[in-house]
Image: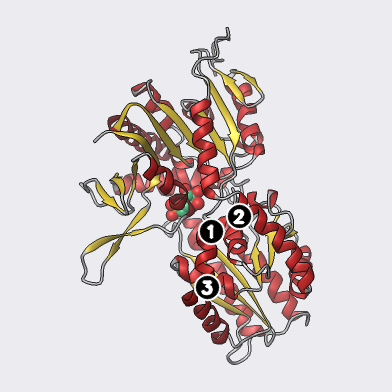
Amino acid sequence: MSADLVIVANRLPVDRVEQPDGTPGWRTSPGGLVTAIEPVMRANDGTWIGWPGGTDAGLEPFEADGMKLVPMSMTQAEIEGHYEGFSNGTLWPLYHDLVAKPEFHREWWDAYVGVNRRFAEKAAELASEGATVWVHDYQMQLVPQMLRELRPDLRIGFYLHIPFPPAELFQQLPWRRQLLEGLLGADMIGFQLPGGAQNFVRLVRQRVGHKTHRDLVYLPDGRTVRAAPFPISIDAAGFESMARSEPVARRAEEIRTALGNPRKVFLGIDRLDYTKGIYARLRAFSELIADGHLDVEDAVFVQVAVPSREQVEQYRILRDEIDRLVGRINGDLGRIGRPAISYLHSSYPREEMAALYRAADVMVVTPYRDGMNLVAKEYVACRFEDTGALVLSEFAGAADELRQAWLVNPYDINGMKSALLEAYRADDKETRRRMKAMRKTVTQHDVAAWADAFMNDLAEVPGSHGKAVRPAKRS
Ligand code: G6P
């Protein structure tokens, strides 16, 4: 097997599931990454390398939905050290502005290096001469350099789906230099926002001592690396047509009926993650009821929390906290058949999400820090009648584009209360004006445009800069 395009990501685009007859099968993962990359994969007959979840060893490459997939198994020790440990116990909180305290453990780092090496070796084995390899996200930051050493003929792109932190925070990492050098193995590094790209270039200049100019880094070996923003998006047309469909319309009606046909439905949909600000948002909503600004006969908050990283301690603590908070709010403020919060700890297929988006009058997205937040864009894509209000954190990448949302600081509970109330009370003319503008943005900048921009720019990074530059600093 030899491929002109290889995608390297921690996860495969399909999850391993048990079928009704008990045999194992595969289901397309719902995430945005899959819809984003699928068209590029098909156009280039690409191959995708990733972990299928679990510890199954010896899984053979296979095809799903016409995509060639190569499963990489992980041992229990690798899951604990690489995935739960360094990726989600160290990098995730550090890159999200220390919303939780990152832990630094040398054995986690060793596991991270080991898994990155295995993925790099697999990509080196599968890529054809001069092929393009596109590496994704924080779990794989060493792959570009490892791969370049094995295969200098390749064109390598890297895209970071989460924020890239300011130098002051990144500096805490005992392995900061290795991560920067790992990324510099790529020809181009994509970030969600300009700020992330700037943070990276500044760190490379200060910490590694390479010469930089605007978004370019000049390496002593003659290579140029470009660091630039490519804000990710969604399949807007796909979401819209799903939202318009008859079954989704019917399901949205059913949902509203099941909720007792309140005047307005508030909605939150998040992975159950401490970066998402779920606790603060539910508190803000409940205080509006306790203060008498909202009544449970008129308003209900549907919160979907998708189970995530359940073996990681911080996530278990969060789950207990949210369980307790929801119990207390409903106990204190609910009436028979009228809970203030309808809480669902589960994941749902895309059609059900579209029905929820259709059923919701006020979408509430309040992360403390988020690379982009595709839920905000999905909601907008589904509101084809230009109705509905979006309350959005300033600290989500999406806030850069969705300026017409009710923007909030999630640390400011009173500010959030006012925004929720304003969005609830806003008249049709106002919501329509805002939604129309946001829909224009989301429809024009869809995921196909994102992938095209990345691939075209990656192809254009000059191979050699021809400048005389100093060797890198030693640290
Ligand atoms: C974020 C990350 C992805 C990750 C996803 C789900 O969106 O950017 O890389 O795959 O969360 O998290 P999980 O740990 O289940 O892969």
In x, y percent, where is residue 188? 52, 29
Q: CA distance from mark 3 to mark 2?
A: 19 Å
Examine the rendered structure and indicate whether residue 21 appears above or below residue 45.
below
Looking at the image, which is closer to me, 154 or 438? 438
Residue 219 position in % (x across, y down): 53, 16
Mark closer to the chain start, 3 or 2: 3
Residue at coordinates 63% horizontally, 60% vertically from top-left?
Answer: 277
| Frontmost residue, 74 versus 358 | 358
- Marks 2 and 1 in Cβ contact (< 8 Å): yes
Q: CA distance from mark 1 to mark 3?
A: 15 Å
User: At which x and y percent is residue 261?
Assistant: 62, 86
Front-most of 161 and 240? 240
Q: Residues within 10 Å of mark 3 (few under 14, many from 20)?
A: many
- What's the residue at 54%, 70% (across, down)? 244
| Up-down relation of residue 386 to residue 102 (above or below) | below
> Is residue 331 shown above or below 197?
below
Whole-angstrom CA distance, mark 2 to mark 1, is: 7 Å
Q: Which label is found at residue 355?
A: 3
Q: Quadrant of the N terminus?
A: top left
Label 3 secondary element? helix
Image quadrant containing the C terminus: top right
Q: Quadrant of residue 298?
A: bottom right
| Amino acid type, mark 2 | Thr
Horizontal side of 126 relative to 462 (left or right) equals left
Which amino acid type is marked by label 3?
Ala
Q: Which residue is labeled 1 in the image? A: 237
Residue 338 visible, this orientation: yes
| Residue at disc 1, secondary structure | helix
Residue at mark 2: 443
